[in-house]
Each structure stands twice: as C-alpha cells, then as structure tokens.
Image (spheres, coloured by chain):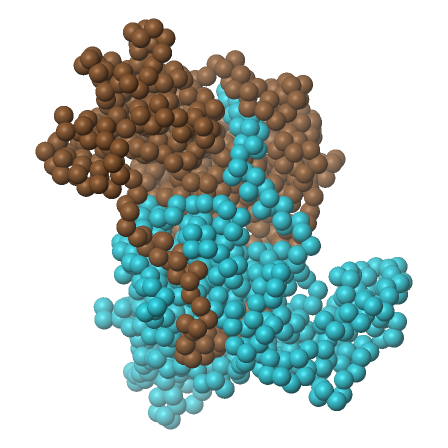
Chain colours: A brown, B cyan
Amino acid sequence: MMISKLQKTTRSVYTMRSVHRSATNALPTLVQHAVVERPAPQETVTASFGRFISGLGAEHLTPTVLQRSKRMVLDSLGVGLLGSTTEVFELALEHCQQMYAPDYISSVYGRTGTKLSPTLAAFVNGVAVHSMDFDDTWHPATHPSGAVLPALLAVSDMMPPNRKPSGLDLLLAFNVGIEIQGRLMRFSNGASNIPKRFHPPSVVGTMGSAAACANLLSLDPSQCSHALAIATSLAGAPMANAATQSKPLHIGNASRLGMEAALLASRGLEASPLILDSVTGVAGFNAFYEDYMPLPLNLDKDKGHSFLIEVQDIAFKRFPAHLGMHWVVDAAASVNKLLVGIHSGTVSASQVKEILLRYINRPFPECEHQARHSFQFNACSALLDGEVTTQSFTADAIRRPELAALLSRVRVEHPADNPANFDRMYGEVQVTLDGGDVLSGRCDTFYGHWRNPLTNESLRKKFRSNAGAVLPRKQVEDLIEAVEALDDLQDCTPLLLQLQ
Amino acid sequence: MMLRKSVTRSFGAAISGLDRSHLTDGVISRSKRMMLDTLGVGLIGTRTNVYHKALRYSQSFASRDQSQVWGSAEKGLPAQYAAFVNGVAVHSMDFDDTWHPATHPSGAILPAVLALAQVLPQQPTGLDLLLAFNVGIEVQGRLLSFSREALNIPQRFHPPTVVGVMGSAAASAKLLGLTPVQCTHALAIAASFAGSPLANAATQTKPLHMGNAAGRGLEAARLAWMGLEGNPDVLDLESGFGVFFTEYNPSEMADVGGFKWALESQNVAVKLFPAHLGMHWVAEATLAAKAELGRGGESDGRLDDIRSVTLRVPPSKYIDCPYPATEHQARHSYQFNACSALLDDRVTVESFGDALRNRPALRELLSKVRVETPEDNHPSFDKMYCDVVIEMHCGKRFVGRCDTFYGHWRRPLSQEDLEGKFRANASTVLSSEGVEGIVDIVRNMEQATDSSMLRLHLQMTTFIPVKGKSGELQHGLHHGADAIKDLMERRVAHKSAGGDHFVFLVHVALSDALTHMRAAQLADGRSGIRSVWVSVQRKKPSQLTLV
C-alpha cells in the first residue's frame, strides 16, 4: 500500500507530509489526520513575537512613543504612590512581607534542611508532585491531590509548635479540598470529558487548595467564600502548555495560589461574593467553561455529608504518563505477550508492518514531557518491553532506534464509540505482522483505574519505589506507617519531619 | 439577587462547617491512599529537571536582592513581589490609564520593569527602561487585536490579567536580554499565569489582578531565563492563548524593520478621578446637565426638586450598580458617579471616601436614578457616549451629553494637567523634592545614564518611620565612617540626567548621633532606631553639604 511504502522512507518530514496529504485523499476521513502531525515548518505567530521582543532596539522608539510612554510612566507612578495609602495595598504588602521575605519555614520534599516560605514550599512541592505526570486522576478529569496536599503541609509547617494540626485535622482539610474540586467539576458537562481549553488542576485545583487551606486555618464562612473568590482570580491555565515543562507549574501554582487566596482571605481581603454563581454579563468561575450550571453545596447538620470520593474513586497511575496512556499500554502489553509467544521471547520492529491504535495523537515525541502525552510512544514502548515504567521516559529509552522504527508504523484511529472521557474510553491495539497476521489487544479498564483499583500492596510497592529513590528505607517505611495511622496522630509533626 | 442564597456562600459555609465527624471510614481510607501516593510521586519528582528549576527559582527568593516598594524608604521585597505590591498600588483605586481595545496597560509593566531593573547586575539606562516598557505595552496592543471581542468592554476575563501578564513577561524578557526562543517561552509560561474572571471587578481583588499581572509576568520571564519551557506555539493555538477569547485570530508581529507601534496610532486615556473609565463620560455629562439647570435660573436648593435622573449609557453589567456598598463598587457605578457630580460639581479622590459616599443626600439622589441603554450606545470606550436627563417635579428637563471626556485619547490632558495630577497624587506620600525630582527625571528619561535615580526619588517620603526597640539604639554607633561615606555617595550626591548636580542635604531633627546611626543603618540595610524624621532638599551644587 501507498502508506506503508511512504512510512518506510526516511525522507524529510516536510516532503513526507505533503506527499502524504495527497495520498490520504483517497482514504476514509478517520485516518486523515493520523500518522504525521509534526509542527508545521512555517513561522508561527509566537515565534515572531519572540523574535520581535528580542530584536527590537532603542532606535525603534519614535518621539511620539517616547513622549506618550513617558506620560504614562509619570501618571502610573503617581497613581501608584497614592495607591500605597489604601487598605488593599496594606493588605497586599503585609502579606508579601510575611510570606515572601526570606523565611525558612516550610520544608521541601526530600530535602533535609531546605526550607522556603510556606507558599513557595507549596509551589515547589506541587511542581514535584506533577513533574512526571505521575499523580492521581479523578473523574471528571483532574489531578486532585497534588493541588491540595503540598499546601496543607506547608500551612502545617507554618503553625506554632504547640498548635500543629492533628492527623485528622489534616485529613479533614484534605477532603474538603478534594470535595470542592469534585463539586465544581460537576457544574459543567464539558468537565466530564478530557479537557480542551483549560487544564483542570489549574482551575479546580486552585479552588481546592484554597478550600483546604481555609478549612485548616479555621476561617469563617464568609472568609471561606472570599478565599474561593480570590482563588478564582488566580486560577486557569491553558491546555496548550500540557506536555511542556510548564504543566507541572500548573499544579505548583494551584497549590501555592490557593493557599495564597486563603491567607489573603484570612487577612480580610474581599472578592466577589457571587463568584460561583452564574451572572450574565459578568463572568465568574464560569469563565472557564462553555456550559455551566452551578449547584449549591449544602451541609445538613443532622445528616452526614456524602463525599464524592465515596461514589467516585480515584485512578492511580502505574507509570508516569497521562492517564489515557494506561489503556493503550495495557492493550499493547497484551499484544506483546502474544508476540513474545510467537517469536520466542523477543519483539523487534522488523516483525511489525503496521500498528493500528485507536486513540489520540502525538506521533513523534521529542522530549520526556511529550512522551508522557503520546499514545504512540506508550503503545510502542509497551509493545517492545511488555510494560511501561519510569525508565521508559529516560532520554536513552525515548531515542532507541527500535522504538523510532515502531513509531513510524503507527496509525491512529478515533472510533466514534471511543469518547475522550476517562470513565468510558477504551484502548485498542492492532498489530499487523509482515506475514499479514494480525494480533490485537484491547483494554477497557486498566489496572489502577477506579473500576480496577490498585491493591494496597501494589500501591505501597509504587510508593516504596518512588520514595525510596530519595529517602532511606527506614524513613520510607516510617512514612507508610505515619500515613496509615494518620487519623490517630495527635500532632502531624512526625509526618512533616519524615518528608525531608 | 438579594434574597437568593448564593452558591458561593453555600460553599463557604460548607468549607467552614465541615468537621471531623463528617469523615467516614471510606473517605479516610481512600484519602490516605491518595496522600501516600501523592507523597511518593512528589518524592520521586524531586529528581526531575523541571523540579530543579522550580526549586532553584524559588530559593532565589531567599536572596538579599531586594526591590523597592514605591513610596517607602524602608520596605524592600524580592523583585516579583515588589512588582506585585506596586502593581496592586497602581490599580488599587482604578486610577490608572486605559487603552483601546480596553485594558490598563501601564500598571502591569512599570512595576515589573522597575523591580527587575533594581536587581540586574548593571543598571539599565533610562532608554533601556523606556524600551522595555514599550515592548510590554506593544505586546498588549498586539494581543488585544487578535479578537474582535476585545474591542468591547469585557464580559469574561479582566483584560490586564490576560494581556497584562503577557506584556509584563515581554517587558521583563526584554530587560533581561533574553534570546528570541527564551522570549517565546516567557510568553508561553506567562499564558499559564493569565486570566482572571471579571466578576472580581469592583472588589478588593481587582487590584490584585494588576499586581499579579506585573509579578507573574516578571516571574515567567525569569523562569524562561533559567531555561524553563512552555508551548512555543501558545499564541497560535485555540487551546493556548485562544482560551481567553470566544473568537480568536492571531496574526504575526511584523519584522522589526517595518515596525509600527500600536501606541502611535492609538493613545491611552488618562483618568482625572479614580473610577472605571466609563464613569468619566457620566460625570462630564452630568455636569453639563447641571450647568443647564443652573442656566435655567435654578438655585442649588432645587436639587430637592429633581424627580428623576436618567442616564443613557452602554450596557455593561459590572458598572451598573444602583446602590454601591463599598468604595470599590462606587468606582464601578454609573449611578454613584452621576449623583456625586450632581451634588459636588465634581468627582474626586474624596468622593469615594466613607463620609461622602454614605451621605443621606447622596442615597436619596441615588433612588432617583434610572439607567437606560440605548441600542446605538456601544459598550466600547472608543464609541460610547453618555446622556444625562434631569427631570424636575415641575416637568422641566435639563439635558447634558458627553461624547469625549477630558482625558480620553481623543481629548488628551494637557501636559500641565497631567503633571498636576501627578503632583497631587505623589505629594500624598513624597516630599516636594521627591515629587519634583520625578517630574524632572521622567521628563528627561531617555538621557538618563542610570535609571536608579528614579528609584531614589521614589523613596523620598516626607516621614520615615523606623521600627525597632529603643534598646537597639546603640547599635548604629558602631558602624564606621566608611559606611556613612558610602551612603552619602550612593544615595545622597548624584548627578542628574541633564548634567546638573543634585545634592541632598539631610536634616535630622534629632542629635548627630542619631544622624550617624540612621546613615549607618541605611547603608547597612538594618533597622535599629525607633523613629527619625528626614527631610530631603534639593540644593544647588555650591551648597553641597555632607552631614
């Protein structure tokens, strides 16, 4: 076939791309945007901006620009000076002086003796949590814990020694943070699907962190509302930064900024009291959604509260990549088993003529962050190795020639019955061998998904392997115990100490 | 709206009200699993490259580098937080400039540029600052042209949080001398820091938007400088910067060769009183109507005879506020600004204070105001107008109209009035020497070889309170004369941009010992004296005096 011939060529991507376009004209529309979606070679608007900013020189400034901008400078200084007498300025200033002076207060994961101001500790620890896309995923889609826990630990570090929260206090605040995220995500049907516009942790995560911190700080109801409203002004980052280094920043920021919102609210800073309500013409939290239907969250004093985490469990990842990869990897791993059976223990690219992958796209990942978001990469890794692990994303593994050879044989389809939804999607891998034999594997629910949760044993194994990379074995085990007994812990200090 | 229980409040109540007894066994066990897992992935995450960058970046806050807080001789903060608080200051009263398409362009840029300049190894020249500032303004103008939606008064996101943070990143990137690729990433990272919904307008949180735009843009540029990367196509994508608009048509920036500044073809509006720009049409139209009423031979007392006041303004939900409850709402209320103008013949800084805001006469008048939104009155600062119709009990009607208020880009403030506004504002905090010095420095900014003069003058407050315990009074005396000399050279004697010598005579209204301690303390960056008055005067070169 035309396609397989083309895929075997090693000509430049550009010529391949144009030839391929004409070649695909005759194919069913499903296949049209498969195979090659490399960045277009033409100049992008963004690059033109970058070049502009860098290239502009003082000689470009005209007299009019100079004159006008000086006027603006002068005026701006004046209003700023007067503004420094306002109450809101005082609040912001106090906040900064306490929070951002060199304060060695809150500890940093895995670093003995390294301390930062609380919000910055929340930031870096949040970044750590999402740095590999290894943290939990909920339905509707978000990574709920990474936005909440670092903030809570940083706040706990901040509290005086005799008034540290108990383990239960911590758990409560944590659940408040998780619950709020779940509630907010149910305000929009769009949130049920894998997001296209805003990265959910940057939206609901920031709110969850604010809620959790507000709870731990025992803010009053009005302050808690304001904490959410302030957090809304700090929320929201576009999806386009997924698969880049900036994605982990989203969680770090969610954690830090939510905490900041709660601290500002505790100082009495106020924001819109209708932020979650749908008010036409003045967008609040609904600015982040296309459809939006807010529902009150009432707490019945007599009846208990039904937490969403009860009805909807969480998915844990087994390897550090976007959740969607786990279906494809399990499907591909089952094909790997078949292949190993046929070919006495080894899988090589030369056996494979074509791989048909039913799902989304990133054909040739160029870095670890792209690899964590590439169905093709994860399918091929699993096909080769029988599994995907932390090591699969090292630079060496990504650049293996066998892997590149396999990647060039991948075709992706988007069947209509496979929605971009973590509750309903599936992954299917079909491998056509050179002889014409077709092997296929399918995964409806991977191990780790909320319908097929990791056993405690598997979860601890994952923890030991992760924590053990940084901490001594004893400390790893102590941590497991501390968390296990958290609800009985009178004072969370031991937990805080174990993390360094 | 008043009676309905808001979702937000119910959330607040739930967050505050939930307690341990609500936790069930299922919840505890599941959440513990999540925590354990999160800790683990966090721990292994500490070995990643991106984490190291984030950590290194955050540790830089613990450095001794401090950027100045405007209008204060004492307070210094890490650069991004100085940018933050100064940005908050600029927008705290909604008194800063407005551009078209609508945003407040300068408040996101200048605090970032000045804060960053202070921590650079080499002080930029005045021209460097102007360049960086303009790059920041320009980027905002370009981005605003990507969507027709931006032409109108906004409904979803507050523009300074969208384009302002990008502008700040661009300006900071420029000042840092980043490469094209780094500049691109600075914008990409900034896009992840952008976007606050409009609902927080008319609250205390709105000024935070400006502070965040300044601080986070600076932060994005510094992260890019450290090598952090974002999506380099962020401006090209609907899922990138496009998320902030309902329709989005990005276009490339022209090559620097044939480049035309947006600021050339479109000037900014400068406000004469601290309120949302739309209020400026209302105030002028109201005064015109009142003048008519005066010409009709009516005395002031006749305000009681007003039956109704009708405002014909563009539809915009967030500035239509019949009974403002706070100063921030008053700055966003057509009704309030019309009534203030009617009662006082002007709207000023004081109009928004508690005393004037809560006057019974004003409340009474507010109840007579009706707002109409004719179809031909577009919610755009370039097209809108305001008609005010005052109807008396006797049936007489007096009409005033404003198409272009004084300060609008079609009718800009004279230089004299602009400086007058600056003097009035700045003198609330700075000594007259500080005020006049800044007027001079900015006037000659493109010639300044060292931009730190501006910061020096921003510190010339009329009163410098020094916090500390009296027991520490002895401390300063131990500092050597060198420290004091250094202080005099660095902070007191300066050559101005124009070549004349500025010499500052420091009068300390206490003893010489205190003078020395104060000097040593400034030089040493320490605080040990309870309070000292310092007045700073500008003298001719011949009068050079070292204290």
Q: Is residue A475 above or below residue A26?
A: above
Along the line of sight, which residue is nearer the eye, A450 or B367? A450
Q: Is residue A61 visible?
A: yes
Along the line of sight, which residue is nearer the eye, B242 or A84? B242
Q: Along the horizontal axis of the image, is B205 left or right of A282?
A: right
Residue at 26 percent across and 33 percent down: it is A10
Residue at 53 percent across and 46 percent down: it is A257
Residue at 27 percent across and 61 percent down: it is B148
Residue B422 appears at what percent x and percent y?
Answer: 54, 78
Q: Along the horizontal axis of the image, is A125 left or right of A325?
A: right
Numbered disc total? 0
Residue A51 appears at what percent x and percent y?
Answer: 39, 58
Of the 4 image quadrants, the one containing the C terminus of chain B is bottom right
Q: Is residue B493 above or below residue A95?
A: below
Along the line of sight, which residue is nearer the eye, B439 or B45? B45
Along the line of sight, which residue is nearer the eye, B60 or A418? B60
Q: Residue furthest left?
A: A26
Q: Along the horizontal axis of the image, is B81 left or right of B220?
A: right
Residue B98 appears at what percent x and percent y?
Answer: 41, 70
Residue B460 appears at what percent x and percent y?
Answer: 68, 74
Q: Which quadrant of the figure has residue B381?
A: bottom left
Residue at 33 percent across and 74 percent down: it is B265
Q: Is residue B446 above or below residue B524?
A: below
Q: Along the horizontal axis of the image, is A112 left or right of A253?
A: right
Q: Is residue B319 visible?
A: no
Q: Which quadrant of the figure has residue A91?
A: bottom right
